[in-house]
Amino acid sequence: MCYLKRCAVQILAALLAMSGHGLASSPAATESLPGQRIYRDGVLPSGELLRATVQQGVPLRGADAACAKCHRRSGLGSSEGRNNIRPIAGRLLFPTTKSEQPASPSVKGGRSVSAGARVAARPVYTEASLAQALREGIDPAGHTLDPLMPRYTLSDTEAEQLHAYLAVLSAEPAPGVSDTEIHFATIITPGVSPEKTQSMLGVLRAFVSDKNAGTRKEARRRDEGREQMDRAYRTWVLHSWELSGPPETWHGQLADHYRQQPVFAVIGGIGNGSWKPVHAFCEAFEVPCVFPDVDYPVVTEAGYYPLYFSRGVTLEAEVLAKHLLEAGPNNKTGTIVQVHRDTPLGRLPAQVLRKALQDGNKQTVVDYTLADAGRMPEEFLPKLLGSQSPSVLVIWLDAADVQNLRFASTPPAGLQEIYLSASLSAMRRPDLPDNWLEKVHMVYPFDLPDSRERRLARMNVWLRAKKIPLADERTQANAFFAVTVTGDAISHLGENFSRDYFIERIEQMTAASLSPSIYPHLSLGPGQRFASRGGYVVRFPPGADSPPLPVGNWLVP
């Protein structure tokens, strides 16, 4: 039995061994194929690095030589400048019908013809002709491939393994996609207020309902199968996965939800604390998680499938460190005291800020921790200010804690500045007398109120049309952006319901999306997972209706 047939038997067994629905997560179908590491990572089954040459002799090794470097993880191609990177996945490299056979630019002297010229169909590859193309740069028609295409050093077995992986890469729709439906989920972790939950769900459900209602008879045209664009249509189905209990149980709950009904992707989602169990689930099951509204995304571990708006409170700590180092208080020798709850999440921004400041100028930073729960003692702040005499006070506390701080009638003479977190404070203006307010700044990774109002006008019109009240601007704007960019990406997939291709489309489309967001600058590139990378530091002028004003420019750590 040839290697490819043996792999097909293994894949079928893996699929049947999964849930009672006969559906598997995508890793089950391909993770046992040694060609996957060659393709994605540039690592041979022996553990040695893949070797190749490009542009008439420039050496490449390992990840730089990996096929995914140019053809992307999906195998469905990309573009670099004026160079078109061809799809090489599954049925597009080894088409079984004429309709699957892609057109190919004519090749003259290793160069593609200019845009708009007639193109010829690419000849069908076999295992032998693929090996020749990989090693010698000659396609099945005898044409020389572009010099940008590497020439690989591969044994017969390694070429066979790569062929086996390419044959199944993006060849079938991902789990969660049937002939008529595409399933999505959104995830809510414990502790999220009912108001925020309903704000997110209201936007997502209205978008899905609107999308399915305005289909212009696509379902009938799909069933008739006349055109490729019609065959690609699927009705959207949204599932709400609400988690309960401690975080260590969430992975099992998500796996149970997924076994009951696999989903193509997770849209949005909302969490009050750590998102790590959800992140781990999405990585393990290779399910895209599109822009959840969270302040504690996973920033210390590699991830491919979760896409985040920003690094959350970690980013705020980095922005504050840059501000203090570049344009902080005049008295740089004073003590910086930061207050936080004594929990892993409470300590996170404090640790990031302390390290950045100590690395930057050996600044003295003192932590003052509160118990992990319970009401704040009334004498807490006066006692702290009296005993520590800080020149800068950084408060990593949530809106309820900040509201409970008891301020004296007059700030101590040595206190120059107070910094709050916009995310943890729910972007609320602190209710303080003017003599305290003039010392308060807020780390603000969002668009400023005046420009945000203009940018969110489109969403607000849509909300009014759907009779959805504006209840939580951040939650609703983030949900609207997540579901809109999902819809845009899905519309560009055609019949290629590959999760990896879906991720790649979002990477390309985020910066150009017409959908507004609460962040002023969003963009992604290949492998980038945090779309907003900076923030403002703002102050609060007197007057209850006065919007916050930036102290300097947008800061990118």
Image (spheres, rainbow, N blue to C red):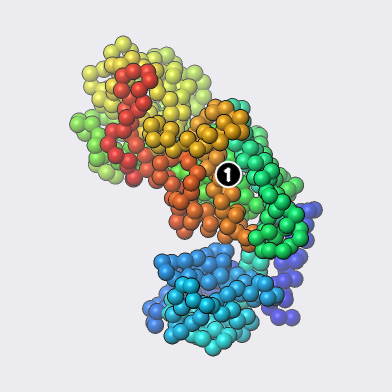
**Residue positioned 43% across, 25% down in the render:** 428
**Residue positioned 23% across, 18% down in the render:** 413
Q: Amino acid at mark 1?
A: Val
Residue 160, image quadrant: bottom right
- Horizontally, residue 222 falls left or right of residue 471, namely right
**Residue positioned 76% across, 60% down in the render:** 224
Q: Is residue 25 above or below residue 475?
A: below
Nearer to the camera, 144 or 515? 515
Residue 212, image quadrant: top right
SS at badge 1: helix
- Horizontally, residue 485 falls left or right of residue 98, namely left
Give the labeled residue for mark 1.
483
Nearer to the camera, 256 or 115? 115
Instruction: Kindly tell me whether residue 382 is visible in this rendering.
Output: no
Residue 207, image quadrant: top right
Nearer to the camera, 336 or 434? 434
